[in-house]
Image (tube, rainbow, N blue to C red):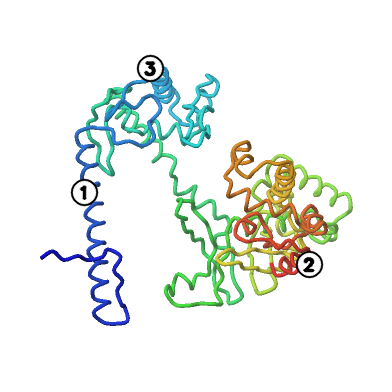
C-alpha cells in the first residue's frame, strides 16, 4: 500500500489549487531555512559564551589551535610594543610614526587564491583596531557582548581597560563643536534670489563619511514639503570656488586702483605690496573671512567683500575704501548628475583632473600588457588591484585623441570624471564618445 510522489512533480499555477500547493511548499522551505539559520546563530553564540574561537581571520599575535587560539610569541611581542607606545605617547598618530621608525610590520597573509596581503607598516586604523580588540585581553566578542575567552591573554585585562578609558577620553577631547561649526565659514553670508538664507547642513554616507552642504533655510523650516526652487550646494566645493573668486579679484589688474581711488600710484603700490605680504605670511590662508555677503541667483553669483576685514589686510581705514568696488558679479552655473551637484564658474578655467589623467595613463599601460599576453588576473595580482577595477577603466585607453587632449588641458566636460567611468561604459567609436561626453 505504498504511494510514490515524484520530486520533480510540476504544478499548474494557472489553477488556484496549483498556486496553493506551490505557496505551501515555498512557505515550508522558507521556514526550514530560517530555523537552520537560528540554530547556527544559537550554536555560535553558545560557543562564544564558552570562550571558544569560532573561526574567521586569525588576529595578529595568535595562531589557530582547534576551537581556541595559541600565542605567536614573535607577533605577540609586537602587540605588546604597540600598547607600550600608546601608553607612552597617548595618540594613535604618534604610535604609528614610532612603530614605523621601529620597523614594526603587520602579519603577512596568503589567501587561498595565492594573493599575499599585509607585511607592511601599521596604519592608524589598524593600530586603533588592535588597541580596542578585547581578544588581546583574553576575551571573545560576540555582537555587543564580551565573554571570557579560553585563549591566553597578551595584554593584562586591567591594563587593556586603562587603554580603553584613555582612548575614550582622547576621542571626546577631539570632538570640539566649535571646531565643527568653524568649518562652515560661509555661515550667515549666503543668500538666494528670494533673500532666504542658506544654512549649513550635513549628511552621512553608509561608510560614516560626513558630507557638508549649504541649503536654503526654507528646506528646514518647511521640512517634508517639496521645494524645487530651493538650493542645496556641496559646501566644500562652493567654498573652494569662492576662494578662487576672491583671489582672482584681489590680484586682478585695476582692482586696487578702483578700490583706493584718488590715491597716488605710490600709495597703490604700497597697498599691493601689503596685500602680497599678507598672502605670503598666511594672513589670507582663510580668505573666506573677507566675504561680507554672497547672493546666489540662477546664472549669477554676486560677491561682496567686507570693507573692515579688507582694510585690516591693506592696513587702511575702512572709510577710505571705495564701497562700489567691493561688489562683483560672476557667471554661475550648476550641473546635476543624480544627487551630485557640480558648480561651474564660467569665467574660471576648468580644473585639471589629475586622477582622470592618471587613470588614462594606467589604462594605456594595462592595454599594452594585455596585448603582450597578460590576463586581467595577472595584472590585478601584479598591481595589487581588483580585476573589476581594471575592467572598468581599461576602456580609457581607447579615448579619442582630442578628448585626451582636452583632459590634459582641463577642458573636459565637468561630468567626465573617474567616478563616472566606473559606473558607465564608454563606446569604442570616437564619434559616439564625443556625442556621449557632450551630454555631460
Residue drawn at x 62%, y 61% as measured from the top left: 424
Reading the image, the residue beneath label 1 is 39
Residue drawn at x 79%, y 52% as measured from the top left: 408
Residue 432 to residue 405: above or below = below
Instruction: Identify the element where label 1 is drawn.
Output: helix
Which quarter shows the C terminus? Answer: bottom right
Which quarter shows the N terminus? Answer: bottom left
Reading the image, the residue beneath label 2 is 431
Task: Tell which circle, 1 or 3, labels the residue nearer the N-terminal end.
Answer: 1
Foreground pick, 12 / 381: 12
Residue 77 to residue 234: above or below = above
Q: Position of residue 372 (x, y in %)?
A: 74, 41
Reading the image, the residue beneath label 3 is 73
351 relative position to 198: left or right: right
96 relative position to 236: left or right: left
Q: CA distance from mark 1 to mark 3?
A: 36 Å
Foreground pick, 342 / 323: 342
Q: Are marks 3 and 2 in contact (CB under 8 Å)?
A: no
**Quadrant in which residue 130 is drawn:** top left
Amino acid at each position: 500500500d505504498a504511494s510514490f510522489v515524484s520530486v520533480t512533480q510540476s504544478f499548474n499555477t494557472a489553477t488556484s489549487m496549483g498556486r496553493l500547493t506551490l505557496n505551501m511548499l515555498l512557505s515550508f522551505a522558507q521556514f526550514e531555512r530560517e530555523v537552520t539559520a537560528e540554530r547556527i546563530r544559537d550554536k555560535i553564540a553558545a560557543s562564544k559564551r564558552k570562550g571558544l574561537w569560532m573561526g574567521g581571520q586569525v588576529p595578529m599575535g595568535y595562531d589557530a589551535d582547534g576551537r581556541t587560539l595559541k600565542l605567536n610569541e614573535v607577533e605577540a611581542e609586537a602587540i605588546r610594543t604597540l600598547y607600550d607606545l600608546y601608553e607612552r605617547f597617548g595618540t594613535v598618530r604618534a604610535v604609528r610614526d614610532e612603530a614605523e621608525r621601529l620597523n614594526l610590520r603587520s602579519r603577512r597573509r596568503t589567501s587561498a587564491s595565492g594573493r599575499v596581503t599585509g607585511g607592511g607598516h601599521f596604519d592608524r586604523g589598524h593600530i586603533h583596531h588592535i588597541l580596542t580588540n578585547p581578544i588581546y585581553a583574553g576575551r571573545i566578542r560576540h555582537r555587543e557582548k564580551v565573554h571570557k575567552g579560553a585563549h591566553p591573554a597578551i595584554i593584562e585585562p586591567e591594563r587593556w581597560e586603562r587603554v580603553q578609558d584613555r582612548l575614550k577620553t582622547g576621542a571626546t577631547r577631539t570632538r570640539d563643536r566649535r571646531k565643527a561649526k568653524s568649518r562652515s565659514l560661509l555661515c550667515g553670508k549666503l543668500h538666494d534670489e528670494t533673500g532666504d538664507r542658506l544654512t549649513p547642513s550635513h549628511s552621512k554616507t553608509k561608510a560614516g563619511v560626513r558630507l557638508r552642504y549649504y541649503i536654503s533655510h526654507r528646506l528646514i523650516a518647511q521640512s517634508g514639503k517639496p521645494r524645487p526652487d530651493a538650493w542645496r550646494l556641496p559646501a566644500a566645493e562652493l567654498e573652494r570656488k569662492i576662494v578662487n573668486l576672491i583671489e582672482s579679484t584681489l590680484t586682478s589688474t585695476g582692482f586696487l586702483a578702483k578700490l583706493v581711488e584718488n590715491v597716488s600710484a605710490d600709495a597703490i603700490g604700497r597697498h599691493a605690496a601689503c596685500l602680497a605680504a599678507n598672502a605670503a605670511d598666511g594672513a589670507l590662508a582663510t580668505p573666506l573671512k573677507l566675504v561680507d555677503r554672497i547672493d546666489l541667483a540662477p546664472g549669477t553669483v554676486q560677491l561682496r567683500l567686507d570693507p573692515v576685514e579688507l582694510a585690516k589686510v591693506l592696513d587702511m581705514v575702512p572709510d577710505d575704501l571705495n564701497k562700489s568696488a567691493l561688489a562683483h558679479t560672476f557667471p554661475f552655473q550648476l550641473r546635476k548628475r543624480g544627487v551630485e551637484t557640480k558648480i561651474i564658474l564660467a569665467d574660471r578655467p576648468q580644473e585639471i583632473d589629475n586622477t582622470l589623467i592618471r587613470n588614462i595613463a594606467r589604462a594605456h599601460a594595462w592595454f599594452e600588457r594585455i596585448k603582450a599576453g597578460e590576463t586581467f588576473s595577472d595584472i590585478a595580482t601584479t598591481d595589487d588591484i581588483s580585476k573589476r577595477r581594471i575592467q572598468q577603466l581599461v576602456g580609457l585607453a581607447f579615448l579619442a585623441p582630442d578628448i585626451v587632449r582636452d583632459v590634459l588641458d582641463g577642458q573636459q566636460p565637468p561630468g567626465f570624471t573617474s567616478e563616472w567611468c566606473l559606473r558607465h561604459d564608454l563606446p569604442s567609436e570616437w564619434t559616439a564618445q564625443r556625442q556621449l561626453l557632450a551630454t555631460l
